[in-house]
Image (cartoon, rainbow, N blue to C red):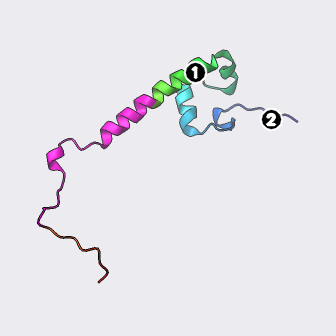
């Protein structure tokens, strides 16, 4: 008996994140994947991933490098066990 797959997450190797990206491209069900060029879909997902990675990287940066806490050069750090 064949199982009917109606959700993107039911496809192998498609989790919540990729399913959300596919929905962002207008692909709402596994059947709709047949209507899309595989390479064009891959390229569109790569653009989404790059934009997400770029925005994540920018969000992780400290806005003001001078505000980073520095250890004074006169401070000595001992790694020996006490």
Q: Which of the 4 image quarters holds residue 62?
A: top left
Per the image, the residue denoted by label 1 is 41
Q: Is residue 55 above or below residue 60?
A: above
- Left or right of residue 21, residue 51 in this image: left
The reply to whether residue 23 is visible in this rendering is yes
Residue 52's label in the rendered image is none
Residue 57 vertical placement versus 47 (above, below): below
* Residue pictured at 65% horizontal, 38% vertical: 13
Q: Of callouts 2 and 1, which one flags the residue occurring earlier in the amino acid sequence?
A: 2
Q: Is residue 55 magenta?
A: yes
Seen in the picture, residue 46 relative to 69 is either above or below; the reply is above
Q: Secondary structure at mark 2?
A: loop
The span shown in magenta is 50-74
Residue count near mark 1 (Cα–Cα under 10 Å), binned few <14, some 14–19, many ≥20: some
Quadrant the N terminus occupies:
top right
Q: Is residue 41 left or right of residue 77?
A: right
Q: Which residue is mark 2?
A: 3
Q: Quadrant of residue 27?
A: top right
In percent of the image, x 41 and y 29: which residue is there?
51
For image coordinates 24% across by 74% down, the residue present is 78
Give the residue drawn at x 53%, y 22%: 43
7 left or right of 69 in image = right
Q: Nearer the viewer, residue 29 or 34?
A: 34
Residue 64 position in % (x across, y down): 17, 43
Q: Quadrant of residue 34?
A: top right
Dot 1: element: helix
């Amino acid at each position: 008996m064949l199982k009917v797959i109606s959700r993107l997450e039911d496809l192998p190797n498609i989790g919540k994140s990729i399913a959300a990206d596919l929905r962002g491209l207008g692909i709402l069900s596994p059947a709709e994947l047949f209507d899309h060029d595989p390479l064009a879909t891959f390229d569109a997902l790569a653009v989404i991933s790059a934009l997400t990675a770029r925005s994540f990287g920018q969000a992780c940066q400290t806005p003001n490098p001078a505000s980073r806490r520095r250890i004074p050069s006169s401070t000595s750090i001992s790694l020996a066990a006490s």
